[in-house]
Amino acid sequence: MKKDRFTIWQKDMSAQITYSASVITTLTLKIRRKGDLMATGELLDKKLREIRTKREVLLQPAPNYESYKTMLERGFLVRYNYESTAIEGNPLTQIEHDGILNRDQCPNTDRMRSVYEAINHADAFCYVNQHAIEPLNEERLLTLHKLLMSHLLDGGKYRTCNITVRGATHPFPPYTELPQLMNQFFTGLEEKRLSLTKYELAAWAHEEFVSIHPFVDGNGRMARLIMNYILLSYDCLPISVPIEKKEEYFKMLDNYYTDRNIIPLVELIIQQEEREADRVIKVMEPLSYPLIIDYNELHNRYPLKEDYIKELRIIMDRYREEIEKRRGF
């Protein structure tokens, strides 16, 4: 059975919960030392648990929950698709990504490679979303790369040549070492689950994969997909690296080759995890009072006139419409 990776929010972000955006937004993420980092990661977990345990406000689920959930998923996919491909030089705008993914619109362009990159990246993330309940192994990694490279090159195979990357200050391993290095990567992935936090594991896997660069193309996108694969396996929200942090992000990856320091990327991951949590809260947070009323129960419990019930229904319907407008519908 495929597990919906937003299930953790579906269970808890209904009208049965009172949310407090301030619970998340008050987190301090100025991390410089590993001790601070660990404490901050634990604080984030604690705050997320607090939000998910504020229950029993209403007995019925929020109206149009599936619409909210779909909006969240589509919104993230478009933004993630745009940012992860734009970081690698894809010229499509976020609006064009939205048209391709949500409205079957192909931009008027001769840049079909860019369009395929957008479609493939979305397909690859859907694969991650569906399979993250299973351990990441070589077979799934190669399948992921094959999806990412569809119509572009013969994907799903390690490179058989040496490569250089513009802007990189260090050489990547020769292709003859890839079998051994990738075997060590998967072994390390399992071993480090016992010693690293989920944020540290996601950062290590991302940086280690980039340092190996096992494919001819798509290594950066693959690293970010792997990072989300691990986050989703722990029931965290998937994250996206903002395009405005591109230079800072590339510097982290480049520095890892010499100092093997994952802390800067862990800090970035936690910051973006907070960012995604804020987005979910903003969309899903019930405002001041229930949107659904059981009018029959209300009539049975209180001696209210039919005209009053009817008027109340009209008022609540108008209120619900206004809330949905404010939430983007």
Image: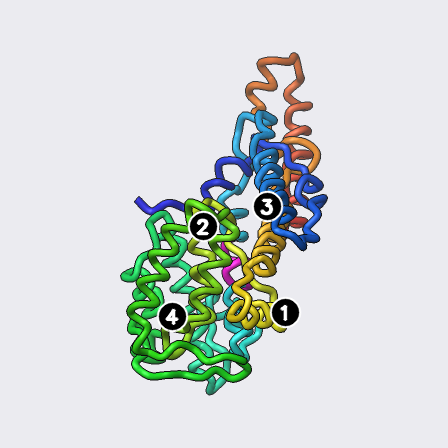
Q: Using the image, tell me which numbered label, if any, was put on residue 286.
A: none
Which residues, given as a range, are shown in magenta? 73-79
Marker count (numbered): 4
Mark 2 = which residue?
Answer: 232
Q: CA distance from mark 4 to mark 3?
A: 33 Å
For the question of whether residue 324 can be seen, the reply is no
> Helix, strand, or loop for circle 2?
helix
Foreground mark, 3 or 1, reads: 3
Q: CA distance from mark 2 to mark 4?
A: 19 Å
Q: Residue at x 34, y 61 (%)?
A: 184
What amino acid type should be assigned to the residue bearing mark 2? Leu
Q: Earlier in the sequence, mark 1 or mark 2?
A: 2
Mark 1 = which residue?
Answer: 248
Q: Earlier in the sequence, mark 2 or mark 4?
A: 4
Q: Are marks 1 and 2 in contact (CB under 8 Å)?
A: no
Foreground mark, 2 or 3, reads: 3
Q: Residue at x 50, y 79 (%)?
A: 170
Mark 3 = which residue?
Answer: 38
Foreground mark, 4 or 1, reads: 1
Q: Earlier in the sequence, mark 2 or mark 3?
A: 3
Where residue 223 appears, as percent x and y from the top left, is: 45, 65
Main secondary-structure element of the magenta-colored stretch? helix
What amino acid type should be assigned to the residue bearing mark 3? Met
**Crowding near pointer 1: few (<14 within 10 Å), some, many (20+)?**
few
Where residue 11 appears, as percent x and y from the top left, is: 49, 36
Q: Using the image, tell me which numbered label, if any, was put on residue 148.
A: 4
What amino acid type should be assigned to the residue bearing mark 1? Glu
Q: CA distance from mark 4 to mark 1?
A: 25 Å
What amino acid type should be assigned to the residue bearing mark 4? Leu
Q: Earlier in the sequence, mark 4 or mark 3?
A: 3
| Observer-nearest of 48 and 4 | 48
